[in-house]
Image (cartoon, rainbow, N blue to C red):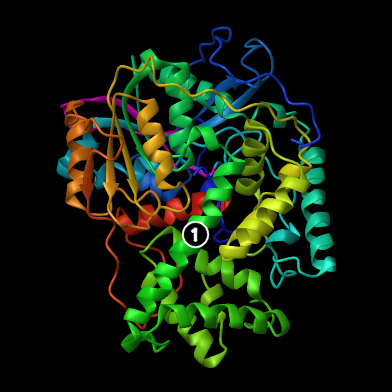
Amino acid sequence: MKRALTIVASVATATALLVPGGSSNAAPQAPQVAAKAPSYTPPAPVWGACTSQRLTKAGAQCAMLEVPLDYDKPKGKKIQIAISRVLHTNPDYKGVITANPGGPGGSGLVYPAVLPGLIPNGVGAKYDWYGFDPRGVGSSTPSLSCNPNYKGQDYDRPNYVPTKKKNLKWWQRVTKRYAKACSKADAKRLLKHMHTTDVAQDLESLRKAAGAPKLNYYGFSYGTYLGQVYATMYPKKVGRFVWDGVLNADRAFYESNVDQNIQFDKNIRIYFKWLAQNDAVYGLGTSGKKIRKGYYKLLKKLDKHPAADGKLGPDELGDVLLNAGYYVNDWAELGAAYAKLVKTGDGADLLDGWYGGPGDDNGFAVYNAVQCTDAVWPNWKKTEADAWRVHKKHPFLTWGNTWYNAPCLNWPAPSRKAFEVSGKKVKSPILMIGETNDAATVFSGALATRQKFKTSFLIEGKGGTTHSGSLSGVACTDDLIASYLDTGVLPKRKKHKGSDLKCAPAPVPAASVSARGTAQRPAVGSTDELRKLLMEAQASGR
């Protein structure tokens, strides 16, 4: 979703993919509105070879797109957006399409090598697919990094839940230091120009560079919000838009994080219930409630005696299991690894592939740079009060998410009122997708966005918990995506305020004793590869 949610995998796919051929105390700026910036037309990109083997095998080309740092000053300083493309192979050409995996902070360069083959009936081959690293991300220059060894992403950190004053002070100190490090790292003055409206204008520059009369677009998570902003700013340029895991623009971004804290807690209960239903495999008991009780008892034990050679404390265990609240595809392997920890005390498998530790902070830096300035962030008094209030009933994620977003409390660039998203001028049909219990972008956000965009049609993965779960092999969903991208036509929209079509959710895997980590690469071109890439994008935004 936007964003939000775990300190998990690294964003290694965001870097080295091509060879070119608010502070809460800052005075908010004026509301973001769809005002016209001076016109800018980018120079033609010089396409060349990509350094990514995945892109090269797909026949991709890579380049740099030159855009203004500040679109209000189109003749001023320029930055470079890393872009990639895989051209259509089917003569029934449909146009240019680009994708954004979310975060914010996720790399999008590799998606032209992944998405076309997942669209049913060969429809993906009818498009020229363009990927891009948003400003500040990965191979775009400048690329934002504040502190790759940020202590907030280390092992066995002080307990997220600040029942002890020393833990509270530690988290306040390290998150404030991270914000300060970002200020020092901002030599290129990028931080004041990291709004979603800036990225939307980069998308418009990409459309112009590609020579497309309209932009077609596939957005996941935060990428749906980027799509909403683009559609508001350039309604006549909207082609065929697919939004999966829809963010409620009216709750970007602090409020949406609060929504996440509640729904992720509900989702982990659903997961524990699934583990209980598969007691024959995992041996954790037949009661989801008892497994949940055991989990919180284990957190207290790990707080005193961390597992995995002192690396796996309560924070790290919560971060790893957060993956189960995002996607069902790892439920089986996570279950095996968690059962091993419970039974033997060995937590090494949980760290293998599911927890990144300190390292590349590019995605995290960009995540903060966008959300801390896109909308006004509250002060610590409100943040703390909300955290304790929600934690009382929904403790699974609340304090971890609070600290993950805490750099915004001292962010060096000013925040401003949220952009006013509107679908009133959009004439093209838009396809939206969401699962009933999506925790990263709660389903009420999809329903609210459906009301804003009267030409939209909403598919609901009934009862599912997967975030951005399209192209998972569910024919009811995926076939409509293919049909829409092929014809531009959607079924008639329902007159009520609910979803327009109910489909099965992303399939839950069979229970398994295998405890392999996600470090094992999935098959190229598979749904599992897409889910892993999306998981990496969300790791930048939790």
* Vertical arrangement, residue 360 with respect to residue 125, above or below: below
* Vertical arrangement, residue 366 with respect to residue 397, above or below: above
Three-letter amino acid code at the position of disc 1: Phe
Query: At which x and y percent is residue 9?
Result: 54, 60
Query: Please, which residue is most extreme toward the top here?
Result: 38
Which residue is painted at 26% across and 47% down in the image? 118
- Was residue 90 drawn as part of the magenta stretch in this picture? yes
Which residue is painted at 80% across and 31% down in the image? 26
Q: Which residues are magenta?
A: 83-103
* Vertical arrangement, residue 317 with respect to residue 80, above or below: below
Left or right position of 51 against 296: left
Which residue is painted at 45% across and 21% down in the image? 422
Query: 411 or 385: nearer the eye?
Result: 385
Left or right position of 252 against 412: left
- Disc 1 target residue: 264
Query: At which x and y percent is residue 494?
Result: 21, 32
Instruction: State whether residue 207 appears in this view.
Output: yes
Left or right position of 106 against 377: left
* Vertical arrangement, residue 194 with respect to residue 529, above or below: above
Instruction: State whether residue 356 appears in this view.
Output: no
- Was residue 179 drawn as part of the magenta stretch in this picture? no
Left or right position of 339 against 154: left
Query: At which x and y percent is residue 331?
Result: 39, 70
Secondary structure at numbered mark 1: helix
Find residue 245 and report its image quarter: top left
Query: At which x and y percent is residue 521?
Result: 40, 64
Find residue 504 and report its image quarter: bottom left
Mark 1 Cα shell of 10 Å, populated few (<14), some (14-19), many (≥20): many
Query: 290 or 147: nearer the eye?
Result: 290
Which residue is painted at 57% across and 58% down in the image? 6
